[in-house]
Image: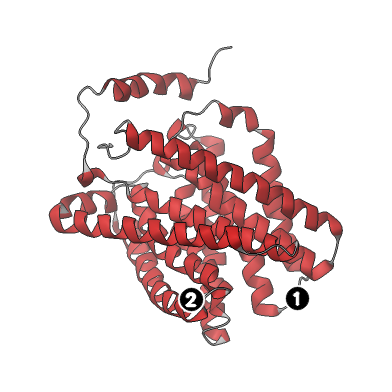
Amino acid sequence: MAQPEAVRGFRPHAEKLSSGEHVERGLRYFPIALFSLVMGIAGVTIATHRTETLFDVPHILSGALLVLASAFFAAFTLLQIVRAIRWPEEIVRDFNHPTRINFFAAFSVSFLLLSIAYLDFVPDIARVLWWIGTPLHLGITLAILNKLIHQDTFEIQHYNPAWFIPFVGNIVVPVAGVEFAPLGINVFFFGVGLFFSIVLGTIFFYRIFFHAPLPIKLVPTFFILMAPPAVGCISYVKLTGCFDIFAQILYSIALFMALLFLFQFRMYTRIPFYISWWAYLFPSAALTIATILAYHMTHEEIFRWLAHFFNVVLLTWLAFFTWKTYKLLKMRHLCVKED
């Protein structure tokens, strides 16, 4: 069967990488996008903990996942500090890149997600992580937005769902923030995140309907579109305490996006593995958590069993992505210079 244009066009580059010719590699090219791995594992940790509670299972697996997420976060942070000290020009290069710039926000979102994950294990650690991550994320969001306003090199073809990360991160703030900060602060972040999610969603569909397809490497980032409504649903319920019509609309949009991606399943199976595959996990985890929340608020059994199914898929993906990432590392294809 003939492959899609984007897939056929990418093959020569993939072969060049496997041959090892003319490819610069090393710690200086450690990808900032790997913080999406931390986001993914933290999201799976939260979803697994909620599922364990739902089915009255001891929190052994979620505890182990929390340790894993924390270890990766600490290691990746240390490696990025080393990059910043030894090769500051690479950090600047990442910040000037139309896609990689958005993964700086994945660093601060990781603080927020770990805060949520620690909330049921060690609340004091959760508080510290939230108070570090919240102002840090606000600063990163403002820095990225300022860059986007004043730059003159990015074009509509550069736009992809990774651009949601800095702004969707604001919607994450209230999930644990309702425990640590006044309502006004949490509503501020929720409103900012919701507003920009609508703006960016409009731009994205214009770009995808009327311009060239996304590069094959970025196709998995489509899943990020599930995150704004799913996280929005969770945050809204945390802020209001009710699963009203607006919360149901947000959940329904997230579920519709999941069905859309399921409809395109065959396309995703033909994509070679890249770090961008980790973009599947956090949005899917957010939908799982929103589903569990919907069950607790409505007591409808369909949500309970959907949550169980989603969590099994999450854990399967986590194991598979970890194995594939290890293979990239073993073949020295992880830390390579990118355009």
User: Does the residue at mark 1 contact the one at mark 2 (Cβ under 8 Å)?
Assistant: no
Front-lying residue, 70 or 9: 70
Question: The disc labelled 1 sits on which kind of residue?
Answer: Cys
Front-lying residue, 304 or 52: 52
Q: CA distance from mark 1 to mark 2?
A: 24 Å
Q: Dot 1, how many residues are within 10 Å of its Cα: few (below 14), some (14-19), or many (20+)?
A: some
Tell whether 301 sits left or right of 96: right
Task: In the rendered structure, find residue 138 and report the number of the disc placed on it.
Answer: none
Give x and y (percent) for residue 185. Answer: 51, 82
Front-lying residue, 32 or 245: 32
234 vs 5: above or below = below
Give x and y (percent) for residue 40. Answer: 51, 53
Give x and y (percent) for residue 315. Answer: 60, 47
Residue 73 quadrant: bottom left
Q: Check disc 1 and report the residue beneath it.
A: 242
Colouring used for the render: secondary structure
Q: Check disc 2 and report the residue beneath it.
A: 126
Give x and y (percent) for residue 226. Answer: 61, 51
